[in-house]
Image (tube, rainbow, N blue to C red):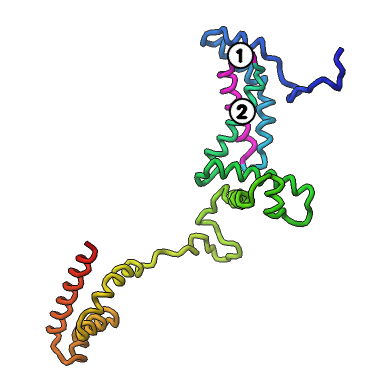
Amino acid sequence: MPNRASVKHHPHDDAPDTAEAFRRLATLSPGPERDVLRDQIVEAWLPMAERLAGRFRSRGESYEDLRQVAALGLVKAVDRYDPERGHAFESYAVPTVTGEIKRHFRDHMWTLHVPRRVQDLRNRVRFANQDLSQTISGRRPTVAEIAEHANMSEEDVLVGLEALESFTALSLDAELPGSEDGYSLGDSLGSPDPALDTVVDREAVKPRLQALPERERAILYMRFFDDMTQSVIAERLGISQMHVSRLISRCCNQLREQVMRDAA
């Protein structure tokens, strides 16, 4: 009789013995009999799948949704398992179910697409934080402490910490903290300044504008920068309003042609 101390306990002590059921399943053709046996095997292993789902309960997803995802992974494992390979079903099912849950988080829980490497860094930082919180009290672990504990560079720790705060996005309709009048995040965001559209044009025309004769340059400044009317400009310069109009039109056409030529 083997020594009890040398007996290696099964990772799941209540794991069912379904080896014979799997061998029989492999011999059955598609049909009601096979479906019933398949469902019985899935039901027998559901407790294991639910325990695997329980490992991910603290990641922001409901346990019921995790159970459903784990059950889906279990069904896939049952359908793909080949008893002829000689491996225990559990050794195939556990990574299959776990992988299904992780894919669920990757595909459905991140509001924005996050590279797999960043997700891995986030998880390593999160686990290191949990470990260090058992030994450090009254404060959060420093970046250096996390890096040393998780065998990571401080740069990777910073990336992981940032990803910890980026798992979900805040709605633009969310009310800002301390707001009493329904002021939302969207209300605090700026909008493009329409004057920006003219910046490039002004910079492009500036050298050509400075090269104009002094009177023409003064007329353009009074008209377009000081917002004077042609009549006021004419009165100030002692010329006719029609002459001012012709000068403005001629200068504008000249500047436009020169700027277009410079761009070409």
Which x, y percent locates residue 239?
14, 90
Which of these two is toward me, 82 or 31? 82
Please, what secondary structure does the residue beneath circle 1 have?
A: helix
The three-letter amino acid code for the residue at tag 1 is Arg
Residue at 70 percent of width and 48 percent of height: 148
Q: Quadrant of the N terminus?
A: top right
Residue 72 within the segment the image draws in magenta: yes
Residue position marked by numbered label 1 in the rendering: 85
Which x, y percent locates residue 32?
54, 11
Which of these two is toward me, 182 or 68? 68
Q: Which mark is residue 209?
A: none
Residue position marked by numbered label 2 in the rendering: 97
Residue 1 sits above or below residue 176 on the image? above
The kind of secondary structure the magenta stretch mainly shows is helix
The three-letter amino acid code for the residue at tag 2 is Val
Residue 12 sits above or below residue 128 on the image? above
Do the CB atoms of the residues marked 2 and 1 lie less than 8 Å apart? no
Total numbered circles:
2
Residue at 59 percent of width and 13 percent of height: 36
Residue 245 sits above or below residue 80 on the image? below
Which x, y percent locates residue 78?
59, 19
Residue 56 within the segment the image draws in magenta: no
Compared across the picture, whether 131 is left or right of 76 comes to: right
Which x, y percent locates residue 160?
61, 48
The residue segment tinted magenta is: 61-86
